[in-house]
């Protein structure tokens, strides 16, 4: 079995011989230390394939204890529409590990960019990744759609602008299809001109080998098609008919898995694209799940701004976003038993020009889960430089991770250990109730010792339900950490409202203390606000600007930022800047050309946010509070520094920063008085600040390292 590095070398050998040779050379040493050469690998990937490789690094380094095979089906494939037909297909054969190899997880990365010499595609078209044949050209024909994607409005982007984006799908549920020789079909729909526009795509599968969470035994297609919805003479229930199944003899539980998206529009309510309708999943006649086919978060898309109506919420999809899987787990399915499964749509009668529900649904049967107690780190959302999480990064406090239960026993508690690799770790006690293969997005609120401007963030889950974890190889994950920007301790929020100021509000949260530091709303249309805000030096802050308030204009609540081409005639344009106390522009949110074709940064959709650290500045005087006291000695210091505190009245934090405000250490204070000792030997000679932050006040002391 070839390792991940060998597969990367084979994938990229047509791009750069030195890079390929480097990877093959590293393969000889990888057994000794699978992570030592990560930075060399990253250096060359950042040089040649920065976007495409980003997500792969995270999974490869985090699963270093597991054998990982990367399979490429489509490499720099140019896709265009066929206006005379409405779709084009791009089949390709790929060789996966043999059927004797079990998978712990299978991920698929889809990467998009403009085709060389062309504009990107203009419209929001459906794209499908389909498993055609398995077992070779004379093998079984499957025609199973495993992923769906809707293209962004990208007409003003060109290859010269270097626009790129990528997304990762978890396709583990389709593992039975991903062995040996497999035909992977990429289908691109659409009717636009194909002479001056197109996309270039890459499709890669990251096969993490190992003991499966639950061994799959059978996959059955239930429904596959685009069906008219709301037409009384052609009811959709005539197409979504109930299906009788007999479970495999080895089945212990099953998963209903669907991709449901609404397209087209009737003449009255905008169904299915622009109306919210629910679907019900029935198992043996009983409703086991009821869910709206709707995406209410299009204005938070990580692909923004776009040329079209990207902010509009839609029937199960957003332009420039993967279609999310609709999963319903059915527990305790007896082997060999007979059942009935159905999907019913909300009763609805349209008028004319009816829309369609495009559904592909499967029943995937599994054996009983392998382990009873099995927790895992599924993902790191922050810190994470991946473009899919750019709205939440970079951070200076409160990491966000995804915890997963891979065991048959509900996961109710766990210890999560996290921090910068090589530094002091912080722990967080998680409690909840997760069933098998269920996730929880967890905000880790205990302070982190970031310690530097960049590094590797590591998170580990331990002691699930107070017991030993039966499978520890996916208990740890790593990501890149980059510190956010540093702003002065006094700033001016410069906000010129547009014609719909009632939608807007903003707040600044002190992420170090967890309290709202400043907030404002109730703005007047077309008025300039200059708010001067003093910040605590060294603290981490979160700035959040919202466009979610009640609208006073005829357009209604639309979450369209401070500028959106469709509403500019009605709402106009607003301006948002962060200035220094002297008036210089530190951050020009709406003026920055954040769009790849010259649109204003004001076209940010639902909200705009960022983290930052308030700097001390070299001339900051010592701050004192009569209710809290702090002493540091010896000063100057060469090695051990004693920090004595008292009268703080409550728990708090002791924070060490440099003169630029970068947090180098955070120590939690649990008592009202005491002494902490830190080793300052590794610090570079110069000025530093020690700060005690409590409910009774904040005290700052200067300390000199010799």
Image: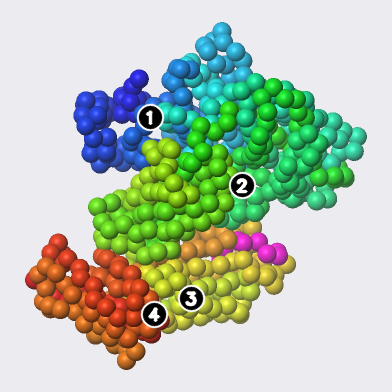
3D distance between C-alphas at marks 1 and 3: 44 Å
The label on residue 318 is: 2
x 75%, y 25%: residue: 338
- Which callout, 4 or 2, points at the residue further toward the start of the chain? 2
Q: Tell me the quarter of the picture where residue 556 sits.
A: bottom right
- State which mark lies toward you, 1 or 4: 4
Q: Label 1 belongs to which residue?
A: 68
Q: Label 3 belongs to which residue?
A: 516
Q: Label 4 belongs to which residue?
A: 650
The label on residue 519 is: none
Q: Position of residue 604 (x, y in %)?
A: 53, 59
Q: Is residue 630 magenta?
A: no
3D distance between C-alphas at marks 1 and 4: 49 Å
Span colored in magenta: 555-562
Q: Residues within 10 Å of mark 2 (few under 14, many from 20)?
A: many
3D distance between C-alphas at marks 4 and 2: 47 Å
- State which mark lies toward you, 4 or 2: 4
- The way the protein has been coloured in the rendering is rainbow
């Amino acid at each position: 079995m070839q390792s991940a590095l060998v597969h990367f070398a084979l994938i990229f050998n047509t791009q750069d011989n030195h890079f390929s040779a480097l990877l093959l050379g590293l393969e000889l040493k990888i057994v000794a230390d699978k992570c030592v050469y990560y930075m060399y690998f990253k250096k060359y990937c950042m040089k040649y394939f920065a976007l495409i490789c980003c997500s792969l690094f995270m999974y490869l380094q985090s699963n270093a204890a597991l054998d990982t095979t990367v399979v490429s089906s489509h490499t720099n494939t140019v896709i265009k529409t066929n206006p005379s037909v409405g779709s084009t297909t791009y089949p390709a054969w790929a060789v996966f590990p043999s059927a004797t190899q079990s998978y712990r997880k299978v991920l698929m990365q889809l990467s998009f960019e403009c085709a060389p010499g062309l504009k990107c595609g203009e419209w929001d078209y459906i794209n499908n990744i389909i498993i055609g044949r398995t077992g070779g050209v004379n093998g079984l024909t499957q025609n199973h759609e495993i992923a769906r994607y809707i293209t962004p409005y990208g007409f003003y982007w060109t290859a010269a602008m270097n626009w790129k984006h990528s997304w990762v799908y978890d396709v583990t549920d389709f593992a039975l299809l991903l062995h040996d020789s497999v035909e992977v079909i990429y289908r691109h729909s659409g009717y636009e001109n194909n002479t001056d526009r197109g996309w270039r795509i890459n499709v890669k599968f990251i096969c993490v080998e190992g003991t499966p969470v639950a061994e799959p035994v059978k996959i059955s297609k239930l429904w596959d098609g685009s069906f008219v919805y709301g037409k009384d003479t052609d009811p959709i229930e005539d197409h979504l008919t109930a299906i009788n199944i007999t479970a495999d003899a080895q089945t212990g539980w099953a998963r209903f898995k669907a991709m449901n998206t609404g397209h087209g529009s009737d003449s009255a309510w905008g169904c299915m694209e622009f109306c919210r309708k629910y679907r019900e999943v029935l198992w043996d006649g009983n409703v086991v799940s009821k869910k709206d086919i709707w995406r209410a978060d299009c204005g938070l898309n990580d692909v923004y701004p776009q040329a079209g109506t990207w902010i509009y919420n839609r029937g199960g999809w957003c332009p420039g976003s993967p279609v999310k899987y609709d999963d319903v787990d059915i527990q305790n399915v007896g082997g060999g038993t007979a059942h009935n499964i159905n999907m019913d749509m909300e009763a609805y009668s349209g008028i004319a020009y009816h829309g369609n529900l495009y559904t592909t649904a499967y029943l995937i049967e599994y054996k009983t889960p392998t382990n009873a107690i099995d927790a895992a780190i599924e993902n790191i959302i922050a810190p994470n430089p991946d473009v899919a999480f750019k709205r939440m990064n970079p951070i200076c406090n409160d990491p966000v991770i995804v915890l997963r239960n891979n065991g048959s026993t509900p996961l109710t508690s766990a210890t999560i250990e996290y921090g910068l690799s090589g530094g002091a770790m912080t722990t967080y006690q998680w409690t909840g109730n997760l069933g098998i293969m269920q996730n929880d997005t967890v905000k880790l609120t205990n302070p982190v010792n970031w310690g530097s401007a960049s590094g590797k963030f590591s998170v580990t889950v331990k002691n699930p339900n107070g017991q030993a974890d039966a499978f520890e190889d996916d208990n740890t994950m790593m990501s890149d950490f980059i510190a956010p920007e540093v702003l002065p301790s006094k700033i001016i929020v410069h906000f010129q409202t547009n014609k719909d100021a009632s939608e807007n509000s903003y707040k600044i949260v002190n992420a170090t203390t967890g309290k709202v530091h400043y907030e404002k709303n109730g703005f007047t249309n077309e008025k300039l606000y200059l708010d001067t805000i003093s910040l605590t030096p060294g603290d981490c802050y979160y700035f959040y600007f919202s466009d979610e308030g009640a609208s006073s204009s005829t357009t209604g609540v639309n979450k369209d930022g401070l500028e959106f081409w469709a509403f500019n005639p009605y709402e106009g344009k607003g301006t948002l800047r962060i200035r220094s106390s002297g008036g210089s522009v530190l951050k020009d949110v709406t003026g920055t050309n954040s769009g790849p074709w010259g649109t204003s940064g004001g076209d940010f959709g639902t909200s705009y946010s960022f983290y930052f650290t308030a700097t001390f500045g070299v001339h900051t005087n010592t701050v004192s509070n009569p209710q809290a006291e702090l002493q540091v000695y010896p000063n100057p210091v060469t090695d051990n520094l004693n920090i004595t505190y008292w009268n703080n009245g409550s728990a708090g934090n002791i924070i060490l920063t440099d003169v630029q405000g970068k947090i180098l250490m955070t120590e939690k204070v649990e008592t009202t008085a005491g002494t902490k000792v830190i080793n300052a030997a590794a610090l570079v000679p110069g000025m530093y600040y020690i700060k005690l932050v409590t409910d009774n006040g904040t005290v700052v002391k200067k300390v000199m390292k010799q």
